[in-house]
Image (cartoon, helix red, strand yellow):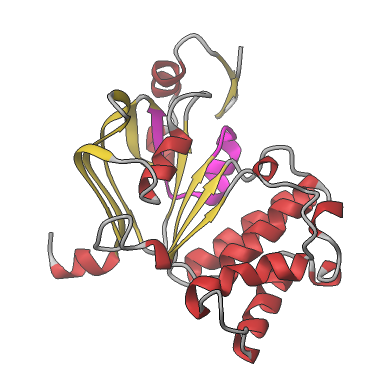
Amino acid sequence: MTQQQDRTAALVLEKASVAYGHVPVLEELHGTVRSGEAVALIGPNGAGKSTLIKAVLGLVPTVRGRIEVLGVTPAQARRDVAYVPQADTLDPDFPVSVEQVVMMGRYRKIGWLRRPSATDRTLAAEALERVGLSDRAKNRFGTLSGGQRQRVLLARAIAAQPRLLLLDEPFNGVDAVSQHALLEAIALLKQQGAAVVVSTHDLAIAHLACDEVCLLNRHQFGFGPTDAILTPERLRATYGGHALELRGDRVIVTQT
């Protein structure tokens, strides 16, 4: 790998296999996500999309091959990686305000024991404005709708100023306004040079937001430019017995 590639490669998968204990979950993954690009992880439920995100975070071991994040190991890169989980993994009853949730994105930079500076507060406020929820800053996080909570979690990630952003099914169950805000925020992060990996079932989102696609179902069925990879043939191979419906130039994947 050249020095220029080292600077631009945010995530490198090199024949990477991931396992829980002795049980393989993903095998022989390969591909590169570069700064300023977005890659969609697409595959059926249980395909290993969330597991791959956890491996990139250093939470699940790579048992063969290599996963490199920002030129180092996943564990070493965590300071510069932000993660947006599925909204339903968080407790909506936790007594914390919207602005407090967003400020959590700054803690890796400032430490948990230091008070946020004026710069930290400005970055958090700007992140919240970017997702269109500045007017909800004082609201309790749990009172927001599912789509609004997902936008707050994205604002938290934006406030961290990540070089790599990982999103796990961020568009599930969100309204059209929230979807638009999420797409705009992802586009802006890409313009600013961040790399983005987004897990999704929505092929339209992959076309709108992503430069490349990684098709997964325990194994990799394709990694490359969106238009080249999202073909009916590759999708049938990836989804197996799941239903595929063709509508003109669009492929609609439904779970059966």
**In this view, 197 is above or below 104:** above
Q: Between residues 199 and 208, which one lies in front from this camera angle? A: 199
Q: Between residues 114 and 216, which one lies in front from this camera angle? A: 114
Residue at position x 67%, y 38% in the image: 172
In the rendered image, which quarter is residue 185 located in?
Answer: bottom right
Residue sticking out furthest to the bottom: 118
Residue at position x 26%, y 40% in the image: 62
Residue sticking out furthest to the front: 113
Q: Is residue 217 magenta?
A: no
Residue at position x 43%, y 50% in the image: 211
Residue at position x 53%, y 24% in the image: 45
- Measuring from the top left, give residue 123's x and y in whole percent: 62, 80
- Measuring from the top left, give residue 165's x and y in whole percent: 48, 58
Q: Is residue 206 magenta?
A: yes
Q: In the rendered image, which quarter contains the N terminus?
A: bottom left
Side (left or right) of 136 relative to 191: right
Number of callouts: 0
**In this view, 151 is above or below 189:** above
Side (left or right) of 12 relative to 90: left
- Measuring from the top left, give residue 224's x and y in whole percent: 34, 41
The residue range painted magenta reads 200-216
Residue sticking out furthest to the top: 241
In the rendered image, which quarter is residue 202 located in?
Answer: top right
**In this view, 172 is above or below 167:** above
Side (left or right) of 3 relative to 183: left
Side (left or right) of 203 relative to 87: left
Q: In the rendered image, which quarter contains the C terminus?
A: top right
